[in-house]
Amino acid sequence: MQSTVPPIATGPIIALTHEFWPKRAGIAVYVEETARAAAELGLAIEVWAPAHPRLLERNYPFTVRPMPVHGTQSWADRLRLALHLRRNASTIRNATLWLPEPGPLRTYLYSSLLNLPQPRQYCITLHGSEFVRFNRKITYSYLLDNLLSHARRVGVVSRYVRDCVLDEYPDIAPQLRLTHGALRYDFEVVGTPTTPHEKPFITILAVGRVHPRKGYHLLLDAIARLPEASRNRCVVRLIGPKAREGYCEALIAQAKYNAINFHYLGEIPEASLGREYTQADLFALPSTEYLGSVEGFGLVALEAAAHGLPILGFNSGGIGDAVAHGHNGLLAPAGDIVQLSHYIDLLVHDTALRHRFATNSLSWVNQFSWKTVAEALFR
């Protein structure tokens, strides 16, 4: 007789998040897709997210409940969230509470102080930056240790985050699960890559928040170090919202000073983004640690791989889990601009290597699944 695996989550699951649609960042995608996969597994899951005029404009296979919070990590928002949770205490006490990102996690660190209702059990996801920052303060470290010890499951999005957590809190090893992200459910994977041929210009695409942690200034520095003939073949296109005042303008000035063909496109619609991926030759993910913030995994690397793009970047944080060095891309040691410049020069001129990486990228993404994430967290 076939046996069934009972779910870890007893009763309903409540995903408590400050990042959700219409935000399009990595954590918002992570929450939505994990909830979707959990619902498809037959689990009763709800997403509680900040109220927004567009929050309920999409259809989901799970319930979405708006909360009267702004989605920040300020104490004012923590207090708003605490009041909302206390008003819904009976619902919380009968549920598995999933804390998938730093905002609600910071609030529940102070559950005693804020008199928060305790769920049947906790599931927690750590993305990296919140862990690094929490452990720089003794008080946060102690509170996080206490919360993690009460969690039934702790998901970590990369081996980097897993190793950081186990180094600080080895006792939670039995609860720990590796929960990489994956492509969005409606993401269209490109078919066979086009036949390789020499091109006069090589388009290097970068997608993400325009913030120093994303390392775009390091990418431009690496391109500036190229021989003139190689540098003149590079066209850099950057897409994403401005997240740090003045940083984008500094990038434009840096590119102009170094005679780099650089275009900042801002935020663009999904359809236009797909065309940008299709027309690019290389994808750049030059993130490095910045003031305690680190790339936990890099979902955008999977999107680039699904479009058959070779990937360049630094082996920083969890990027080494999202990109296979030497298989579908090249990753320089974190912050090593000289090595990154060498890799760019290599791929600009080696058409056959670009094609091999592109072919490998299309098969690489198949191993990542949101169903696997949901099962690891809730079953």
Image: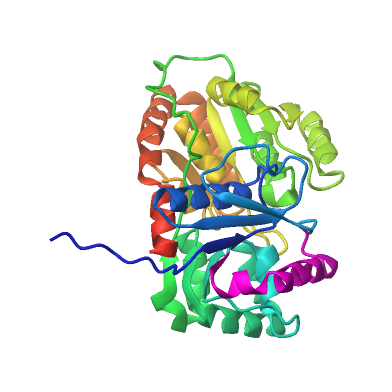
Colour scheme shown: rainbow
In the displayed structure, would residue 280 be above or below residue 109? above
Q: Quadrant of residue 261?
A: top right
The image shows residue 371 at horizontal and vertical percentages of 40, 50
Left or right: residue 285 compared with residue 239: left
Q: Is residue 149 left or right of residue 259?
A: left
Tell me the chief SS of the magenta region.
helix
In percent of width and height, residue 13 lies at: 52, 63
Q: Residue at x 40, y 40 (%)?
A: 365
Quarter of image, res 189: top left
- Image quarter (top left, top right, bottom left or bottom right) of the C terminus: bottom left
Q: Which residues are magenta?
A: 72-98
**Image coords of residue 325 (percent x, y):** 42, 46
Number of numbered discs overlaid on the protein picture? 0
Magenta-colored stretch includes residue 139: no
Q: Residue at x 75, y 80 (%)?
A: 114
Residue at the spot 61% in from the left edge and 30% down from the top edge: 205
Q: Is residue 84 visible?
A: yes
Q: Is residue 133 visible?
A: no
Q: Is residue 199 left or right of residue 69?
A: left
- Residue 81 placed where, x, y %? 75, 67
